[in-house]
Amino acid sequence: MTAFRLLRYFSTVLNSLRYILETYPSGSDSQGCGRFTSLRTVTKKSLMPLKTIIFNVLFVFILLSHIPAYSFMSDTGIASFQKEIAGKPVGERIALWAEKFVGTPYDPDPLGEYVTKKVIVADERADCMYLSFRAVELAMSLTPEEAVIIALDKRFINRGKLGNNGKVLNYEDRFQYGEDMIDSGRWGREITEEFGKVTEITGSRGRKKVKMVLKEDLLKSLRSSKSSSSLNLRDGDFIFFIKAVEKRKVGEIVGHIGIVKTEVRSQSERPSVGDSTLRVETRIGKSEVRNNEEQRAESKDQREIYLIHAGGLKNKGGEVKKIRFSEYINSMPFIGIRVSRFN
């Protein structure tokens, strides 16, 4: 049933209800609460609208109980978008797929719904781990079926296994810690040192030390340049957010994961640079066309950097959000970041 037909059906139900209320005026009990006139005073003929409204209400409730609260994309839609963006760089594809999940409800399952149900695809809800998994799997494949095959490699420390019924047999072998993902080398090349002074903190789970860029150093860079574009982040970069040592609960070093999405500012937000061919005056009064490197440097200042992440808590809910990177860094509860990039 289409949304339009469903709305028409609701309208019919409401009209029927209004008719019933007008036909059977309410009396009042000793406490002043409205109630229907006794059904014994209603004739068999006048009961027909009441039966109709009861049937309609029951039908609508049954219909709604079978409609999912949120629907991501059909396999046909996924395949179509995979084909549409196939020629773009892998990082851009990752960012575009992450963006598709914006608005998806946060997964409240402590293990992750996909783990509990032992499935690869559970797109109706997402936590930060599932968003990371799925964005990469869809970006690196050309069909929904191929994305499942890639998932068996990317989600697991060794390799995932599927049973004859399509259920995952060994989710206990999955990546459960963000630090294991970035240290495996299978989740991009670590480029943390490109983003500022590296600081070491105490590690855990076999790691003596962990390197990261402190939140304070990131904020200094953002304030000095007045733009997050100076950090040279690219589409599809993975940001692993580091927890303070005293806030670790089960030895986790990474407390959250997000994906970078860059966008060119609107024309009204850009600095005025004239036409598309950039020229500068030389000392002798002649003009020359700027080289490509200079134009690329100029374009950095025209970019806005966003973070796409599953913003929520297991006991409170939330959704996948897209927020300016600088805003998130400024208010985040983490002490630093590590960064990886798929080439």
Image: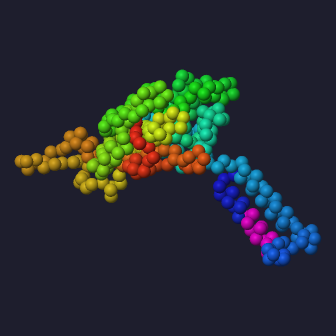
> Is residue 272 visible to the viewer in this orientation of the structure?
yes
Q: Is residue 16 left or right of residue 269?
A: right
Up-down: is 330 above or below 121? below
Q: How is the image coloured?
A: rainbow
Comparing 135 with 115, the one in front is 115
Tell me, yes or no, whether the highlighted magenta stretch contains residue 18.
yes
Magenta span: predominant SS is: helix
Comparing 83 with 101, the one in front is 101
Residue 24 rendering spot, x and y as whole percentages: 83, 74
Q: Residue at x 61, y 37 (%)?
A: 111
> Is residue 94 visible to the viewer in this orientation of the structure?
no
Residue 108 rendering spot, x and y as whole percentages: 61, 44
Up-down: is 31 above or below 234? below
Up-down: is 6 above or below 118? below
Looking at this view, name the residue that lies furthest to the top.
Answer: 158
Q: Residue at x 38, y 36 (%)?
A: 212
Residue 194 rendering spot, x and y as whole percentages: 32, 35
